[in-house]
């Protein structure tokens, strides 16, 4: 895996279910926050929830052999911790296995929650 300059190049470096899930995840993020800015951060797909956002104002997704990683921010993970018990999770991330559908309603709630926190701290 090389260095990526766009989310398209990142997603297109994968095949099969990983690529499908990354596309699906990206579409969900853009649908939820149409004004999101796409970029590469830490050589994975990142999304600024506010224009020119810093790292803590971004969501990230990453593809792996058996799952897609979602990095919404530790505050979001803490808030949704109990709703994520079906998934492998850590302080700032959750893994959604490729053999199960993405929990789109839950992911959308997480995105909107993080966006609201960001708006509260930047207002």
Image: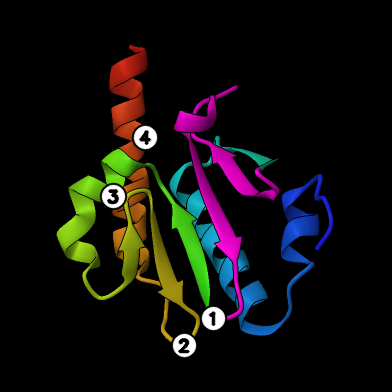
Q: Which residue is mark 2?
A: 99
Reading the chain from its start, which is encountered first: label 3 or label 1? 1
- Give how far apart the Cα atoms at labels 4 and 2 are: 29 Å
Residue 100 in percent (x, y) is at 41, 84
Q: In the rendered structure, are the residues bearing label 1 and label 2 in contact, judged by CB atoms less than 8 Å apart? A: yes
Q: Is residue 117 above or below residue 66?
A: above
Crowding near the residue tagged with mark 1, few <14, some 14–19, many ≥20 C-alpha atoms within 10 Å:
few
Crowding near the residue tagged with mark 4, few <14, some 14–19, many ≥20 C-alpha atoms within 10 Å:
many
Magenta includes 93? no
Q: Is residue 81 above or below residue 103?
A: above
Residue 22, quarter of picture: bottom right
Reading the chain from its start, which is encountered first: label 4 or label 1? 1
Q: Which mark is residue 77?
A: 3
Q: Which residue is mark 1?
A: 66
Q: In the rendered structure, are the residues bearing label 3 and label 4 in contact, judged by CB atoms less than 8 Å apart? A: no
- Give how far apart the Cα atoms at labels 4 and 1 are: 28 Å
Q: In the rendered structure, are the residues bearing label 2 and label 3 in contact, judged by CB atoms less than 8 Å apart? A: no
Q: Which residue is mark 4?
A: 115
Q: Which region is colored magenta?
A: 42-66
Residue 91 in percent (x, y) is at 32, 50
Q: How is the image coloured?
A: rainbow
Given residues 84 and 101, the one toward you in this image is: 84
Figure quadrant of the N terminus:
bottom right
Which residue corresponds to the image point at 70% horizontal and 48% vertical from the top-left?
43
Magenta includes 47? yes
Reading the chain from its start, which is encountered first: label 1 or label 2? 1
């Amino acid at each position: 895996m090389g260095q990526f300059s766009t989310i398209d190049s990142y997603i297109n470096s994968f095949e099969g279910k990983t690529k499908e899930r990354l596309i699906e995840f990206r579409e969900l993020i853009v649908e939820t926050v149409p004004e999101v800015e796409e970029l590469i951060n830490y050589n994975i797909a990142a999304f600024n929830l506010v224009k020119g956002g810093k790292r803590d104002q971004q969501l990230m997704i990453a593809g792996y052999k058996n799952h897609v990683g979602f990095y919404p921010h530790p505050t979001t993970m803490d808030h949704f911790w109990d709703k994520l018990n079906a998934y492998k999770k850590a302080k700032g991330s959750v893994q959604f296995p490729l053999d199960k559908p993405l929990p789109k309603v839950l992911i959308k709630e997480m995105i909107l929650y993080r966006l609201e926190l960001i708006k509260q701290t930047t207002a």
